[in-house]
């Protein structure tokens, strides 16, 4: 038994209400359970209303597994608990008194819970502790209607979480959406391995400099490779291209007083050559060379086809037969792949469009859902495991939703806050 479960029972009135009595056998009529205090310290429910033995009360409700937990938690010394009008417990093992020595009325919940609800609770939460997720065995029982609606809500939660970083970057850049897009795109061009390194690189270059240099691919490449630390030392191999960039970078570094002490190191280890940071930087430079007002473009675009055209990006000639500065390789075009563009759309473009429209006071959820439904779902261990559990996953919206489900609910054991957990617990 957990306090979370008892709070759930009280909040949603999942117990027999018609013949309630306190542990003193006084008639109890519940008028209002109160407002759940989720984030702040103090009683669990504020402003509850009830009638005890004909007397109407308004005040707070505290929930514990045992009555004695009141003293274990030292509530008797905390003035925030002076207005508690009802102590809701699973087991009443002792009387609880106010400062004036009057007894606080107690409701023992276990006397009013059905055996069926307890059975479902134990099956869902107590007997599946070794499962990948608590409801692994019972997930196929959940109706498609419940799953569909819950996935939409989960995806919106995930968008709101992604908005936190965007809002922080907006604050740091005086609400320059183009500058924020530059930083977000940089972070996501680095993917998981080099994402933070790319973000630190974009932080080291004021976007006004990118604007001034956007007409020259050499200057953009010099800025990015120079600030990333790839032009610092002499190297063996073909040096002409690198020397051009190094010369250009030293000029720009002096002109704009550039510093890169805060730029994190880039990693190549265990990466496929197409994901080497050198290749991603070359593609990133080409993107901004070809698109001088990128944010304005993404706001205007509303179809997947137009986004794919926008991100139809290659590299400069040098990188067509190189993966690093040092060694020549077989000539190969290094365009952004559809899979990579999909990740950029999922993690950068759609979140920033969502927040921008929201800040304008408009709702674009339907447009967002439509875009996501056209993108293939991501491939990772979370998605694979949910597919094995027969969870319907057909698009990027589904995969984003279940990532949110796993991280924010399953891993946190927050089944009582989950629509799937509630469905299985209540059998509906």
Image: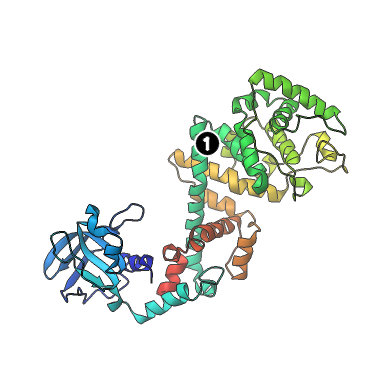
Which color scheme did the rendering employ for the protein? rainbow
- Does 351 sit above or below residue 388? above
Q: Residue at x 60, y 25 (%)?
A: 208
Residue at 83% from the left image edge and 39% from the top image edge: 320
Q: Is residue 227 above or below residue 188?
A: above
Q: Is residue 186 above or below residue 18?
A: above
| Quarter of image, res 300 | top right
Residue 248 visible in the current orientation: yes
Residue to which mark 1 is pinned: 169
Apparent side of residue 297 relative to residue 366 in the rendered image (left or right): right
State whether residue 356 appears in this view. no
Q: Residues within 10 Å of mark 1 (few under 14, many from 20)?
A: many
User: At which x and y percent is residue 227?
Assistant: 68, 30
- Residue 282 sits in quarter: top right
Direction from residue 48 to residue 221 in the image, left or right: right
x 46%, y 72%: residue: 125
**Total marks drawn?**
1
- Name the quadrant containing residue 238: top right
**For the view shown, which residue lies furthest in the left direction?**
54
């Amino acid at each position: 038994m957990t306090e979370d479960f008892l709070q759930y029972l009280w909040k949603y009135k999942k117990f027999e209400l018609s013949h309630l009595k306190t542990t003193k056998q006084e008639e109890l009529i519940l008028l209002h359970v109160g407002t759940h205090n989720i984030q702040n310290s103090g009683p669990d429910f504020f402003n509850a209303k009830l009638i005890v033995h004909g007397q109407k009360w308004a005040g707070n409700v505290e929930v514990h597994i045992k009555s004695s937990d009141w003293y274990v938690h030292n509530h008797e010394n905390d003035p925030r608990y002076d207005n508690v009008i009802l102590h809701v417990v699973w087991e009443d093992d002792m009387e609880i008194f106010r400062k004036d020595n009057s007894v606080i009325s107690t409701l023992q919940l276990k006397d009013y819970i059905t055996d069926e609800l307890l059975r479902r609770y134990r099956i869902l939460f107590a007997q599946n502790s070794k499962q990948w997720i608590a409801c692994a065995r019972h997930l196929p029982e959940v109706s498609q209607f419940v799953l569909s609606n819950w996935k939409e809500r989960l995806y919106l939660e995930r968008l709101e979480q992604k908005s936190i970083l965007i809002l922080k970057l907006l604050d740091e850049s005086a609400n320059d959406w183009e500058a924020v897009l530059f930083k977000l795109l940089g972070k996501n061009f680095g993917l998981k391995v080099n994402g933070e390194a790319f973000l630190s690189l974009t932080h080291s270059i004021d976007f006004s400099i990118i604007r001034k240099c956007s007409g020259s691919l050499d200057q953009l490449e010099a800025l990015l490779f120079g600030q990333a630390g790839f032009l610092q030392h002499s190297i063996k191999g073909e040096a002409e291209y690198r020397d051009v960039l190094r010369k250009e970078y030293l000029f720009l570094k002096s002109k704009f007083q550039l510093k890169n002490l805060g730029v994190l190191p880039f990693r190549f280890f265990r990466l496929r050559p197409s994901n080497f940071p050198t290749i991603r930087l070359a593609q990133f430079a080409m993107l901004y060379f070809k698109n001088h007002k990128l944010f304005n473009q993404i706001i205007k675009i509303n179809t997947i086809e137009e986004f794919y055209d926008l991100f139809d990006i290659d590299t400069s000639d040098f990188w067509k037969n190189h993966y690093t500065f040092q060694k020549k390789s077989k000539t190969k075009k290094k365009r952004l792949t559809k899979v990579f563009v999909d990740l950029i759309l999922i993690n950068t473009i759609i979140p920033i469009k969502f927040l921008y429209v929201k800040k304008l006071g408009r709702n674009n959820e339907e447009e967002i859902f439509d875009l996501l439904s056209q993108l293939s779902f991501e491939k990772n261990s979370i998605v694979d495991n949910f597919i094995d559990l027969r969870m319907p996953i057909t698009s990027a919206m589904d995969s984003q939703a279940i990532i949110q489900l796993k991280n924010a609910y399953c891993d946190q054991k927050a089944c009582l806050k989950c629509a799937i957990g509630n469905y299985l617990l209540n059998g509906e």
